[in-house]
Image (cartoon, rainbow, N blue to C red):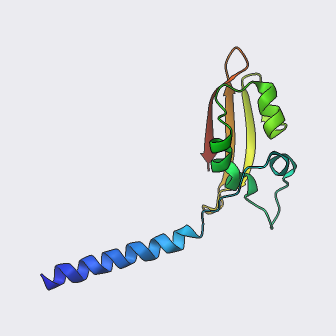
Amino acid sequence: MKKIFTYGLLIFGATILIGLVLRGNVVQESFEPDRWKNWVESESEPSLRWNMMNSLREKHPLKGMTKTEVLELLGEPESKTKKKFDYYLGASKRGISTGRLTILFDDNNRVSDFSVWDG
């Protein structure tokens, strides 16, 4: 019984320690359209757009927006086609990975879906 308690305590402690270490890697930035549009990746702000993604999704439901509304909100994408906009998000803080926001449009030029890619 004493071994079970000891192992349980060790697992609990390790879980808390891992949580505290990983907590430092998650940064939340409030979404601000002007900062998003004018962001330039640099050593001081390598992940600004990535850090704004949760706030963007909470404040601005993208599904159903028109292309014009997306452009007003996010500015010109790094690449685009008739049906898709891609926005570079910067470093994802998972090794050397970067992120990308992909927005898909339907035949009525409204957002039908979007995804965030990490890799």
Q: Residue furthest right?
A: 38
Tell me if residue 80 can be seen.
no
37 sits to left or right of 119: right
Q: Where is residue 34 in the image (x, y as percent from the top left)?
A: 85, 47
Q: Tell how many labels.
A: 0
- Can see residue 67? yes
Image spot of residue 65 (x, y percent): 71, 27
- Residue 87, quarter of picture: top right
Q: The N terminus appears in which quarter of the rendering?
A: bottom left
Comparing 7 with 59, the one in front is 59
Residue 116 lies, with reference to residue 25, above or below; the image says above
Q: Which residue of the protein is positioned furthest toward the front in this rendering?
A: 59
Is 28 placed above or below 87 here? below
- Indicate the position of residue 25 as horizontal and vertical percent values: 60, 66
Point 84% across, 36% down: residue: 76
The part of the image, by quadrant, that contains residue 40 is: bottom right
Figure quadrant of residue 57: top right
